[in-house]
Image (tube, rainbow, N blue to C red):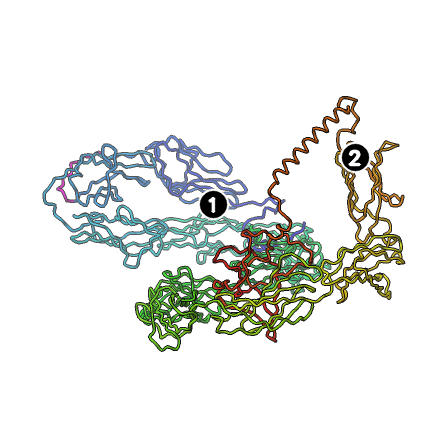
Amino acid sequence: MIMALRYVWPLLLCSPCLLIQIPEEYEGHHVMEPPVITEQSPPRLVVFPTDDISLKCEASGKPEVQFRWMKDGVHFKPEEELGVTVHQSHHSGSFTITGNNSNFAQRFQGIYRCFASNKLGTAMSHEIQLMAEGAPKWPKETVKPVEVEEGESVILPCHPPPSAEPLRIYWMNSKILHIKQDERVTMGQNGNLYFANVLTSDNHSDYICHAHFPGTRTIIQKEPIDLRVKATNSMIDRKPRLLFPTNSSSHLVALQGQPLVLECIAEGFPTPTIQWLRPSGPMLANRVTYQNHNKTLQLLNVGEEDDGEYRCLAENSLGSARHAYYVTVEAAPYWLHEPQNHLYGPGETARLDCQVQGRPQPEVTWRINGIPVEELAKDQKYQIQRGALILSNVQPSDTMVTQCEARNRHGLLLANAYIHVVQLPAKILTSDNQTYMAVEGSTAYLLCKAFGAPVPSVQWLDEEGMTVLQDERFFPYANGTLGIRDLQANDTGRYFCQAANDQNNVTIVANLEVKDATQITQGPRSAIEKKGSRVTFTCQASFDPSLQLSITWRGDGRDLQELGDSDKYFIEDGHLVIHNLDYSDQGNYSCVASTELDMVESRAQLLVVGSPGPVPQLELSDLHLLKQSQVRLSWSPAEDHNAPIEKYDIEFEDKEMAPEKWNSLGKVPGNQTSTTLKLSPYVHYTFRVTAINKYGPGEPSLASETVVTPEAAPEKNPVDVKGEGNETNNMVITWKPLWWMDWNAPQVQYRVQWRPQGTRGIWQEQIVSDPFLVVSNTSTFVPYEIKVQAINSQGKGPEPQVTIGYSGEDYPQVSPELEGIQILNSSTVLVKWWPVDLAQVKGHLRGYNVTYWWEGSQRKHSKRHIHKGHVVVPANTTSVILGGLRPYSFYHLEVQAFNGRGLGPASEFPFSTPEGVPGHPEALHLECQSDTSLLLHWQPPLSHNGVLTGYVLSYHPLDEAGKEQLSFDLPDPELQTHNLTNLIPNLRYRFQLQATTKEGPGEAIVREGGTMALSGIPDFGNISAMAGENYSVVSWVPKEGQCNFQFHIRFKALGEEKGGAYLAQYVSYNQSSYTQWDLQPDTDYEIHLLREQELLHRMVVKTNGTGRVRLPAAGFATEGWFIGFVSAVVLLLLILLIFCFIKRSKGGKYSVKDKEDTQVDSEARPMKDETFGEYRSLESDNEEKAFGSSQPSLNGDIKPLGSDDSLADYGGSVDVQFNEDGSFIGQYSGKKEKEAAGGNDSSGATSPVNPAVTLE
């Protein structure tokens, strides 16, 4: 048997049980037992007629117990009594009295006591008082009518027969209806019915008192009482008088632990009310109940603290009456220390303690074997000292049963306790050869439970027979257990427990195994994590390999696995992961590593940090300062969530002017919880406060109460005052309206003043509510002095500043004079012009609009329509670089000045660009010719950018270092193929081809590849064939780097030796698929891929369908006349369809020339406003590209860009960036201009005011 020592320690606490009884494990010895009373009748036994009377007395003991009875101190032999039956049982002396009746029961009344004896002593029962009660009867009496005048008090007596058991009293009428009780009519504890004052409605002749006797289960009733009430016209008021109790005070004795009932019933008119008082202090509500309309006070479970005076007070409007109850709390005897049965060995000292308490103090007497000690011989060896009976040096002959009896006037206590002196051989009750396991460093407990009489001595020996107590780590217990602290590995072994008394000597062996202690090698580390994140704790442990390790996690003492929140915690392989951290997750987390022998724990603390909690308890004070637009705001500190609060942000909301919009009033340090706020006039302030720490702002507080500051004159005037005309004869004055916070009143208006600049004349003014004013009938482009002032119901704002504005502009009347165009390279030119006369601009010069378009190539003229480009130049710049032009091309240029009204007249100038290098050739392909030759195919470049002079071909091997690149000119510009020979087989080459003009070679196209020898056997990767009813498609994936070549594909029907084969078709390897038509349905075909009679691949495919086409039998359908007839009908229908088509198309013809003339390229259309100023692509990369997007004009003409164009709708200023020399370069956009709407008011001009271009 193996025992883990962690479960042994509780057994050490059971050592005293050896002195109480002989253990059940102690077998093989027949031990005698003194008598012990096991069951007896209650101390008070009340019997009623027809009840059987049973007196119980049962006891245990060895040898068998004998019983005897005493009645009223005299021997009573139940077996000799008539009508008495004695129970025939080994452990019972009970008897039953049958045939009970009133006279018969009276004969057996008395006090009984039972004695149970054997050779070791006598046990005694307590006193049993038997009381016999007959059937209850109400004594016959003559009940006279009770006459009373209305308003007086009266008592209707009950006086039920006496009974040993409590009665239940009811007052009812002859209809068996209960008499209604209230504050005026009450039944007392004695059963009487009390009327504080009678009314005429109380006049009845059938007041009947009923008494219920639970013992006999009977109810008897008193003769009816006739209550006669005399009516009166004048009821006399009187002060209260107590009907019960009648005197002013009384003394009561209450028993501890029992209920106490106090009662006061008063009469008077009006009906008195009752109150209860205790002079010594208040009465506890949980222990006191008031009943019977406050006339009865009941204390439950009376204690010593209830001793004292209680007063009842009866009151009405005329006075009061009172009664004092003086309560003395006494107690029946109760045990402080009850004597217990004990076993003793020879020579020991026996002591029985009998400590009792009660009020008054009980008298304690001792008996030995049922005989009072006073009646025993004086030479007894016992002593009685302070309630204890003591016997020294006991021997087996001293075995006895003692009785301790305590008595006062409230009751009696009795206890039987025996002193049993035995002689028993020593016996070890712990199993022999038991194995104990413990870990190093812990304490082991080796059990050796021994029993005997006298008590055997126990010692522990090692394997050499030496006592183990020489090592201070070994220590014994009184019950024989050996403890070993600070266990070491070499403590493993066998230990011997030896128990001996004067009769024998016995020994057992205990085996101890010391295991490696469990240790946490890596415990969880304390962490600080942000709310909403996750944290991982790790736990690793070492343990004895013969044990089983278990790792569990606990959070603040709770097993996390028991929480059942699988989404919150993830536990696996010594890791604890807590997801979605909240502030409630912070605390102490521990890893518990345990085996069946030990347990270790490692703790870590988790702090969850984050933004602060909401600020509580906002409070406004110093409201009298609102007149000075100030108020004091205070709050309680917010929860900082483990990060100090750095500051508080104070915000406000005006629910009248800007509901649900919070504005900041400022911030205060985090250690400050109040501040005085400077407020603005006439604002409905509602405040809130938000705490901020290093993790950000927390939740805002609840909103405060709303306060309103008084009105005041404006303290600010509007800003951004401007004067600009939108017509040639007006000026629109605008300004940024005041923020509602600056109104300082419910409404605000603006006082606008203006006069021509420099006139010193009278200011014209107008008061408006909107943030603009239109001044009409002005001259064109005249400066004005302008002032705008805020006003409200409380006054005017401060004196405003003067702003200069201008009346409306007109179109510029002057065109820029071109200084010249400088060619910078084949695609870039520098355009210069002279500044315009500002007086002719008729407004603010906003800049220059430069428009240019491609008119065609110098190599070959094109009739395609123009692509216009636009560049907007600032007013202080008179040059611009146009880049991204097409080399060797004709261009047209226009320059216009513009102001806020629009564009002026244009200056025009044509120019051309020189030749440039061409673009790269198109579609360079390599075709294998042999193992040493390749054929190159290409297409000319899309952009010639001049006149092509030929090509430059360069190539070099990729796999051999040191090989120079070979390059040679191909002077024929029309050349598109070239055959390269003398190439090295199995080498990979890089080929580079460039087109040339007189300016040199252009961009190169590069391909890599090799000869047929490098490609090896052709690879038809992923080749497959699919078939329809009369066709088949063969497809394959060309291998990357595989040389292109020609091969044949041949189809042949299977099963046909002759014929059935289709001619072989030439196919290129790079084309990836081939389709063969005119196949027979439902036929298997063999497909061969051949190159110069070499079979490259073979496959089989079957066509769909129901069968091959068979020639039908000869019939009229095959006759020539029928075929001719059908052909003629088909030809006639074809002619008819052609004629219908021609008729339908008649009148819709037009010449190609007319069609070209009516087409308008979309690039030539005026741009809408939003596209003005963007750089436009002049042409595509391919000069031969057709303009498929061109559409015919709806009205047949396009309005030219001229001086009628207006920029009045493009307000704003030019935002450009310049180079160091003052020039800038525009960037082109491929975006096409949209068609402009027609009409007299529509202008084809584009606005240069808001260009969507970055100037560099």
Mark 1 surroundings: few (<14), some (14-19) or many (≥20) residues within 10 A = many
* Residue 660 magenta: no
What range is drawn magenta here?
139-152
Give the dominant element type of the magenta stretch: helix, strand or loop.
loop
Please name whichever residue, 1096 or 1207, is drawn nearer the observer in this view of the structure.
Answer: 1207
- Give coordinates of residue 1144: x percent, y percent: 61, 38
* Residue 148 magenta: yes
Mark 2 surroundings: few (<14), some (14-19) or many (≥20) residues within 10 A = many
| Dot 1 amino acid type | Ala
Q: Residue at x 50, y 62 (%)?
A: 1205
Please name whichever residue, 1025 or 1182, is drawn nearer the observer in this view of the structure.
Answer: 1182
* Circle on res. 301: none
Quadrant location of residue 309? Answer: bottom left
Please name whichever residue, 1201 or 676, is drawn nearer the observer in this view of the structure.
Answer: 1201
Please name whichever residue, 495 or 489, is drawn nearer the observer in this view of the structure.
Answer: 489
Quadrant location of residue 68? Answer: top left
Q: Secondary structure at mark 1?
A: strand
Can residue 395 be seen in the rendering of this structure? no
Q: Circles 2 and 1: CB distance less than 8 Å?
A: no
| Dot 2 amino acid type | Leu
- Give coordinates of residue 192: x percent, y percent: 23, 42
Q: Which residue is mark 1?
A: 123
Q: Which residue is mark 2?
A: 1079
